[in-house]
Amino acid sequence: MKFKGTSIISLRDFDRESIMHILDSTRKIDEDRTAYADRLAGKVLATLFYEASTRTRLSFESAMLRLGGKVMGFADPKGTSAQKGESLADSIRIVESYSDVIVLRHSIEGAARMAAEISKAPIINGGDGANQHPSQTFLDLYTILKAHKRLERLKVGFMGDLKYGRTVHSLAYALSMFKTRMFFISPPLLPMPADHLEELGEMGVEFSEHRNLDEVKRDLDILYVTRIQRERFGDDLDYERVKEGYFISEKSLEGCKPNMKILHPLPRVDELSTDVDSSKHALYFEQAASGIPVRMALLCLVMGAMK
Amino acid sequence: MKFKGTSIISLRDFDRESIMHILDSTRKIDEDRTAYADRLAGKVLATLFYEASTRTRLSFESAMLRLGGKVMGFADPKGTSAQKGESLADSIRIVESYSDVIVLRHSIEGAARMAAEISKAPIINGGDGANQHPSQTFLDLYTILKAHKRLERLKVGFMGDLKYGRTVHSLAYALSMFKTRMFFISPPLLPMPADHLEELGEMGVEFSEHRNLDEVKRDLDILYVTRIQRERFGDDLDYERVKEGYFISEKSLEGCKPNMKILHPLPRVDELSTDVDSSKHALYFEQAASGIPVRMALLCLVMGAMK
Amino acid sequence: MKFKGTSIISLRDFDRESIMHILDSTRKIDEDRTAYADRLAGKVLATLFYEASTRTRLSFESAMLRLGGKVMGFADPKGTSAQKGESLADSIRIVESYSDVIVLRHSIEGAARMAAEISKAPIINGGDGANQHPSQTFLDLYTILKAHKRLERLKVGFMGDLKYGRTVHSLAYALSMFKTRMFFISPPLLPMPADHLEELGEMGVEFSEHRNLDEVKRDLDILYVTRIQRERFGDDLDYERVKEGYFISEKSLEGCKPNMKILHPLPRVDELSTDVDSSKHALYFEQAASGIPVRMALLCLVMGAMK
């Protein structure tokens, strides 16, 4: 796969080889960041956030600054031409003449794909609605690879809201290329969607569904936890009842393998106790920190600044 | 005209010679941008947008970054000292001690002029209410010059809302120095204001007024289209009726000279069909892109970084 | 006191010697800014403003840019993870992995202290509620030192809202280390709080309380004026009556020493007439400008880029 000038829109555009190339590029940067300190000198990144997302925006901006590049953009759509009725296509055509690479976050599915078809500057999808957020998946993969020194044949549990969790769907899809054994742990109301399970089955993935962590915790190499949002429940009482069963504390991790690692896309609210932070299982802050080298690699690759 | 340390407030401060100097400086930068990549290294631009305008802000920021300079500022007045009752004069006195050059956008006519009288750092007017937005006019002129290799003796049509269109008033004023033949095409409700027409007459400009494009399209070298805003009409039906007659499509351009070029300050909404985008007449995205070299030239000139 | 890696949270963490070290570092930078133009090259400052404060944010950003560093962050909490229920502790843990130094502004007292306990990157408190805003006090001190060539044994009047004025409390505390004679001039409703007066007494400070400037103006070397906010009064009439007595004009300064200087943390509204701006007493715009070298010094010191 040629990266120079290519937009990064969806995990589904990447095969195993191109994923490994991104992770390998990330590792190179991670091992010697100073060697890349001027790699994108003179280049301008535009961060167009039609939907606010401070973390994603700041980590892309930090990545660009760490590469010696410059950044401009907007953090929310207020005051943009979109509010005067301008089409996204027109906005992209203009901004591409101001900048060398664009990170786009938009509430509408497919917005990033459409932008990439118009723009001469490469687009990196920073999230399009409930659809895709590929750099998150790359950093999830990189964190797992760094922790276990391999991606193949791991046993990975996904826990929490598996129905609406875009990060879970995307990571499961990616890991399906690496012979992963998957365990889906969710309340009955929020299971992994049937079409996703069907697809995993077709790809030869071995998986099982569960209602609680205890059933599987002895087996796991990775536990990927996501937030269960109150809004998903009609009734607060239902939410409280469910939440309790999907609450991770140091105690609930007793019996896990010593090198089992917990990931979480963050922010967390109640589902993951702060007493886990100091345990040997906690890897979620390192995971967030991996956003920098992963996004540095993506920027370098699409700008042709790295083989 | 001496540019170093001079504020850029209104087209009316510029004569033909100083306009040509700006356009010539723009051309030099446009032909060899990399030669200017460090021209404003170490300098700080403050972008003070008391009225949101993402496009103007981003193009000034991009211009400053392309010159090796740095940028800080705010994109809307929320949270500024203005909300605590501070006068603009006080705000300018403080920001000038933080920065080397200031781009100011404000809703009040005359705000930029007042700021320039106070500030030791040069001010560039990024739009003051319905009044002036000089860098827009310079980029309009540069786009025309680049397309036709001259500014003199062109036939220029202005179409749409000519009553409230600040870009039209300013561009017509500027072109009056270049022996332009002007055609004003507007609905009866939105004509070119009488005082503007009178002034053009006094300057010896030949012009005529029209109700539709067909009357004049065979003659035009440039057609400058502006948006007709629904808010201008009391009645939605009136708006719809008028809009239809001022809608430009590829079909409505049949019979124009092959090298007739369409400009539009953007954003466009309904008045200019996307089927024109791929025609030989479309020049509006190049026009928007010209914002970068024009603003690079303005920044260099007022900072004394260019003769 | 070791500065490298140390957070700047409260004036109360600094003794006379460490204050003088900061002011001396500021002087060095102020005398030769260009010598520091690349001092923080490659470093990234994160400005996290959970409460909007354009002036503080822009002056820290300008300081960082003047040192060759880079800046990213947010200007208000809208769209941050805090709104999704994330704790400040989690947000800090993530941002510290994106940046080298953090300026934090937060509405809750103690937020900066808590952040400093978590963060490996040094935190500079840009204001935590009504509590501390140390860089403001350092720039007040630096302005006084620059004007009078000493901090010791000056006669300093504080006037306006002394009850809620955090800048007053902090500056009075700092000046208590320098044998300052203090005069507190306020309406009966807004006096210097009793516990602050008690503490000053214990530190051996000589002070007195007054109802109007005339009683003391012949003695003063510095008059520190603060805004009296309408919100403090139940009744608009009360406010108007009080305001009148605490209004500084050129006329009300007759009889002051020729080299008496007026400071004001700004923004001002009605309490300080613009006719004072051109008088020999006005020092408040120089004071605001001192924010840059002071904040450059703080950034250099905590980053270990200055002895």
Image: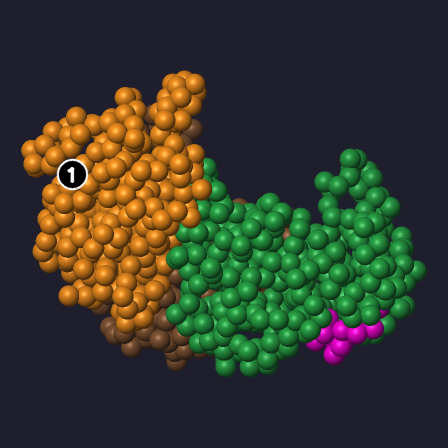
Chain colours: A green, B orange, C brown
A245 in the magenta segment: no
* Residue drawn 26% across the image and 29% down it: B215
Q: Nearer the viewer, residue B144 or C76?
A: B144
Give coordinates of residue C215: x percent, y percent.
22, 44
> Residue tagged by mark 1?
B181
In the displayed structure, does residue C243 sit left or right of residue C43? left
In the displayed structure, does residue A290 sit left or right of residue A44? right
Q: Nearer the viewer, residue C139 or B247?
A: B247
* Residue drawn 36% across the image and 26% down it: B245
Give coordinates of residue B57: x percent, y percent.
36, 51
Q: Residue furthest toward the right? A: A215
* Residue B164 visible in the shown view: no
Q: If the image is split into quadrants, where does the N terminus of chain C sit?
A: bottom left
* Residue drawn 32% across the image and 59% down it: B63
Quarter of the figure with residue C180: bottom left
Quarter of the figure with residue A86: top left
Q: Nearer the viewer, residue A18 or C246?
A: A18
Give coordinates of residue C176: x percent, y percent.
37, 61
In the displayed structure, does residue A65 sit left or right of residue C211? right
Q: Nearer the viewer, residue C199 or A191?
A: A191
* Residue drawn 22% across the image and 65% down it: B28
Above or below A214: residue B249: above
* Residue A65 visible in the shown view: yes
Amino acid identity at mark 1? Arg
Give coordinates of residue B134: x percent, y percent.
23, 46
- What span is colored magenta in the figure? A143-155
Pinpoint the chain carrying mark 1.
B
In the displayed structure, does residue B299 sit left or right of residue A43? left
Q: If the image is split into quadrants, where does the C terminus of chain C sit?
A: bottom left
